[in-house]
Image (cartoon, helix red, strand yellow):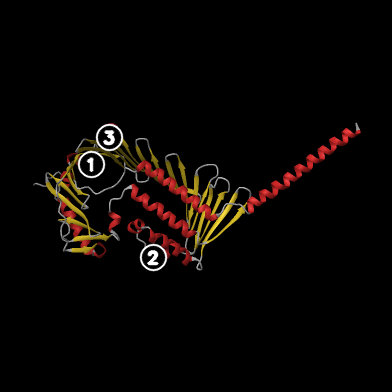
Amino acid sequence: MENEFIENNKGKKIGIIILIILLIFLIFGLGFYLFFLRPNPKNYLDYISDEITSYSNSFYEKFKDIKTSKSDKTLNEKGVLEFKTESEDLKFLNNYKMDVDLKAKNKDMILNLNLLEKNEDFLTSSMYLTDNSLYLELKDLYDKTIKLGTLEKEDEIEGISIIDLYKNLSPLIECYKEALKESKVKSQNLGFTKIKFTYEITDSNQEKVVKKFKQLYEKNENLKENIEIEDFNNLFTPAKIEVIINRFNKEIYSFTKTSDNDTLKISKDEDIDKYNIKYNESEGTLEIIDNQITYEEIKDEKIVSSITFKLLVDGVELNYNQGKVNFNFSIREVENEDLRVALKIQNSEDKIDLDVDGDIKTSSDTKKTNFLANLKIDEENIQINYNGNTTLNSEEIEMPTFTNVKEANELTENDYNTIVQKLVGKLLTSDFIGSITGFSSEV
């Protein structure tokens, strides 16, 4: 009996000793993993790069057939604007109609808009984009062509497909990733689940970082052709980037970039897909739920504005709120590839409400457009109805030669007065003013 007790006791002691040894191995093994085999910050850049590329691949697969290309066709839109109201103060609007004649050529970047009264020109304007410069003509209002500005690069206005965007995005990310590996890199444990990676660009390593990026950029002919970089040093100014992640699933808890002039911090709420964003003095939250993205601007711990973009099964919807102003816009595809457009604007402070409902009915070569807008200002209701037809044809629109040109930033007060005076003169002789006073412009 005594021997049996001794044997049992020995067994328990051996079991305890083995358990202690296993615990020691576990502790040392865990410590070895945490401090020696922890995720490498350079390898994490590879992981992030692969994740972004994977996301852009899935995006590309969904939208690869969408592209904005320049068409040889000319768009013609002809329609009539008509006003109706039951207000006694605004009843003059019931007699007013205006014809709309619009022509646009995408290939040559030409837009002509003509507003007419009783088939006679009321206001004609044209816009042209040529030689990277944007020009505006205001017929009968100003005798010179106004040059609005110049684009830096013609490629910026070329039609570009989603596949072109993707081809540029992926190699650009690769260049940034490999260049950032040349910065000062380190990692730091923040407990059992969290780890912090730091990438620091300093005066001493900036040249090496820029050299690596430039080297990879120069090797990619497609990237060089589509994205022109004049000053590589501006891409990598001295800054510190800190990323805190979950060491097991690599989920990002926070991202912080600090430089001499700017500070950007993005942190994620652990319970929901909401990101807190702070850029210098600006602060907000970004929330992503299924097919909906919402950004809220925060000031003094209060939401001052919000914008929501929602991808619907049959279209898209956009909502914007700021103070007492609410804006809602949606466009949906209905049967036979027709489109339905809705717009709602409310300004409770100025007592303004605007509701617009529109239908765009399509056929092989013609689109019929109909929009009905209800405008309410200070309890006064105005109904605006537009009916039009849109066609595509081979009509030529010539690009004029601009000789009498004036830069927009060189317009003087006298120039502005000339434009305003001529516009007022047109209004005074128009049917619109005639409907107010009771006299026709033909008298």
Q: Residue 326, can we see it?
A: no
Res 334 visible = yes
Choose between 380 and 224: the one closer to the eye: 224
Residue receiving disc 1? 90
Q: Residues within 10 Å of mark 1 (few under 14, many from 20)?
A: some
Look at the image and tell me in which quarter the N terminus lies.
top right
| Residue 361 in the image: above or below residue 411 | above
Instruction: Provide the secondary structure element on which disc 2 rests.
Output: loop
- Residue designated by label 3: 337
> Of marks 1 and 2, which one's residue comes earlier in the chain?
1
Residue type, label 2: Asp
In percent of width and height, residue 289 lies at 46, 40
Mark 3: amino acid = Glu
Q: Nearer the viewer, mark 3 or mark 2?
A: 2
Q: What label does residue 244 carry, if any? A: none
Q: Which residue is mark 2?
A: 231
Q: Position of residue 142 (x, y in %)?
A: 17, 59
